[in-house]
Amino acid sequence: MDFGIEHWLCVGLRHHGALLGLNYIDMLDNYLPILLFIIVGIAFGIAPMLLGRLLAPNNPDPEKLSAYECGFEAFESARIKFDVRYYLVAILFILFDLEIAFLFPWAVVLREIGWFGFWAMALFLAILVVGFVYEWAKGALDWE
């Protein structure tokens, strides 16, 4: 009988594992789903890029290769300083977006969590309102 390399590799791993009291084949079987998950994840990430590269038309011209920013050529460096208000607005958006993300699940389970859950969320919202009033008083929401 002519056995392939897989057979002899398997026999070798079993033989040496038995000498050490280990069963390498069973141990490697536990990692097979993880390996498959990694391979499928990489394939899902790379396959669309390869398909786009192979199947998409490639007709470069000067207009397609030019720098495009809001319909006109860039006139300043990309390393200019931004006003801090952009960052304040972004942080406030994230803050209130997270507030909404917490309110939806809270509203769904409000009957199960009872009064304790109600007052915990009321305290959470009160803290956010205090921060909102502070930002408003400091003028962070005034845009000039």
Image: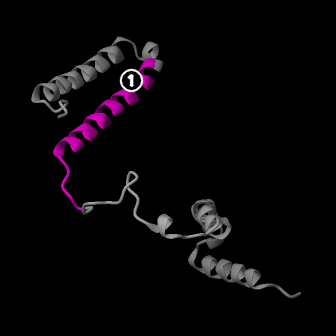
Q: Is residue 59 above or below residue 6?
A: above
Q: Nearer the viewer, residue 33 or 78?
A: 78
Q: Position of residue 120 (x, y in %)?
A: 29, 20
Q: Quadrant of residue 90?
A: top left
**Residue drawn where x is 30% and y is 35% of the image:** 93
Quadrant containing the C terminus is top left
Chain part drawn in magenta: 79-107
Q: Is residue 1 above or below residue 30?
A: below
**Residue drawn where x is 37% and y is 55% of the image:** 72
Q: Kindly state the secondary structure of the residue where label 1 is placed.
A: helix
Instruction: Read off the residue under disc 1.
Output: 103
Q: Nearer the viewer, residue 17 or 141?
A: 141
Q: Position of residue 42 (x, y in %)?
A: 57, 64
* Amino acid, disc 1: Leu
Q: Quadrant of residue 97?
A: top left
Q: Position of residue 78 (x, y in %)?
A: 27, 61
**Residue drawn where x is 20% and y is 51% of the image:** 82
Q: Is residue 101 magenta?
A: yes
Looking at the image, what colour scheme do you see? one colour
Q: Quadrant of residue 13?
A: bottom right
Q: Is residue 116 above or below residue 59?
A: above
Q: Is residue 113 above or below residue 40?
A: above
Q: Is residue 84 magenta?
A: yes
Q: Of helix, strand and loop, which mostly describes the magenta segment?
A: helix
Q: Position of residue 60 (x, y in %)?
A: 55, 70
The residue at the far left in this view is 138
Q: Nearer the viewer, residue 114 or 105?
A: 105
